[in-house]
């Protein structure tokens, strides 16, 4: 069966520090991969998605970047975190664009 | 303009009763899909139910059913026989052709014992 792993679960970082959140999917090949951000008490905003290795699409301009170095690995990064980067980050995958998403357990990021 | 609108920030329901969570959407795409997800306090998003725009019948999954009214552009989630474990945030989402999933702002459901 397929599983998605996301870590760390919580992270507290100072403003201006770098960020690296990792997400890996097991049990499937060539998945579509997604990074979402959820502000407190609000819905999910799509940040990045990838349909293949090295293929990254950005939905909104921001301080973050994403990379897909391997087929089932998706990384969310920042060189210098801002206070506004605080939030709950969710990684997700599906087999095809029109299929339902499977989500990871999320990372609560607090930038202080 | 909002693509997905959930007008109920919070809802309360008595255990064992049914509850309807509202969702309206805005699209000119004839082909689209509607999803409902549940987010418990742990944070993980759990898929509940899906309705395609061309589906003739309302989708059902166990205690969950989707009241799909295409002309009104609404896709309300109905939870029958509520349980304490149903307390969570519920999100409606839509996917249009060649576009990614768009989520509403969510409804916090609290089931009272």
Image (spheres, rainbow, N blue to C red):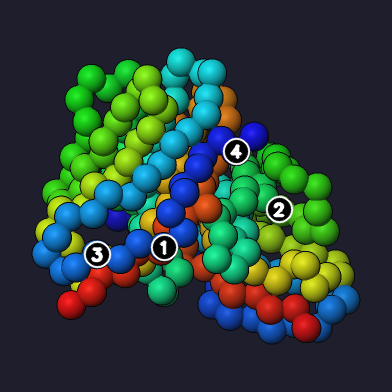
Residue name at image x 81 percent, y 53 percent: A62
| Residue at mark 2 to residue at mark 1: CA–CA distance | 37 Å
SS type, badge 2: strand
The image position of residue B41, as x and y in percent, is: 41, 74
**Mark 3 — residue?**
B13
Query: In the depicted view, which residue is nearer to us: B80 or B39?
Result: B80
Indicate left or right for A9 with A54 as reference.
Answer: left
- Give the residue displayed 46% in from the left and 47% down from the top: B6
Q: Residue at x 54, y 18 (%)?
A: B28
Residue at the disc numbered 1: B10
Q: Quadrant of residue B1?
A: top right
| Residue A67 badge | 2
Tell whether label 2 touches label 4 (CB within 8 Å). no
Q: Identify the chain of the residue marked 1, using the numbered disc in the image.
A: B
Image spot of residue A36 (x, y percent): 59, 55
Check the residue under mark 4 and report the chain it is in. B
- Tell me which numbered mark, 4 or 3, is placed earlier along the sequence: 4
Question: Depth check: A97 or B62 in front?
Answer: B62
Whole-angstrom CA distance, mark 3 to mark 1, is: 10 Å
């Amino acid at each position: 069966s397929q599983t998605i792993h996301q870590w760390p679960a919580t992270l507290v970082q100072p403003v201006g520090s770098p960020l690296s959140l990792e997400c890996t999917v097991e049990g499937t090949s060539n998945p579509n991969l997604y990074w979402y951000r959820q502000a407190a008490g609000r819905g999910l905003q799509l940040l990045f998605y990838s349909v293949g290795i090295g293929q990254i699409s950005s939905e909104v301009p921001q301080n973050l970047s994403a990379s897909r170095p391997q087929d089932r690995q998706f990384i969310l990064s920042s060189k210098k975190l801002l206070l506004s980067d605080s939030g709950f980050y969710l990684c997700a995958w599906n087999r095809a664009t029109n299929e339902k998403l499977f989500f990871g357990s999320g990372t609560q990021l607090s930038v202080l | 303009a909002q693509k997905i609108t959930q007008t109920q920030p919070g809802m309360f329901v008595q255990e064992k009763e049914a509850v309807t969570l509202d969702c309206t959407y805005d699209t000119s795409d004839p082909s689209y899909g509607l999803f409902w997800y549940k987010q418990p306090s742990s944070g993980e998003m759990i898929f509940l139910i899906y309705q395609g725009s061309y589906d003739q019948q309302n989708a059902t999954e166990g205690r969950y059913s989707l009241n799909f009214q295409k002309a009104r552009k609404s896709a309300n989630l109905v939870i029958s026989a509520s349980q304490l474990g149903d307390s969570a945030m519920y999100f409606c989402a839509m996917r249009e052709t060649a576009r990614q999933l768009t989520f509403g702002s969510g409804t916090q459901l609290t089931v009272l014992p």
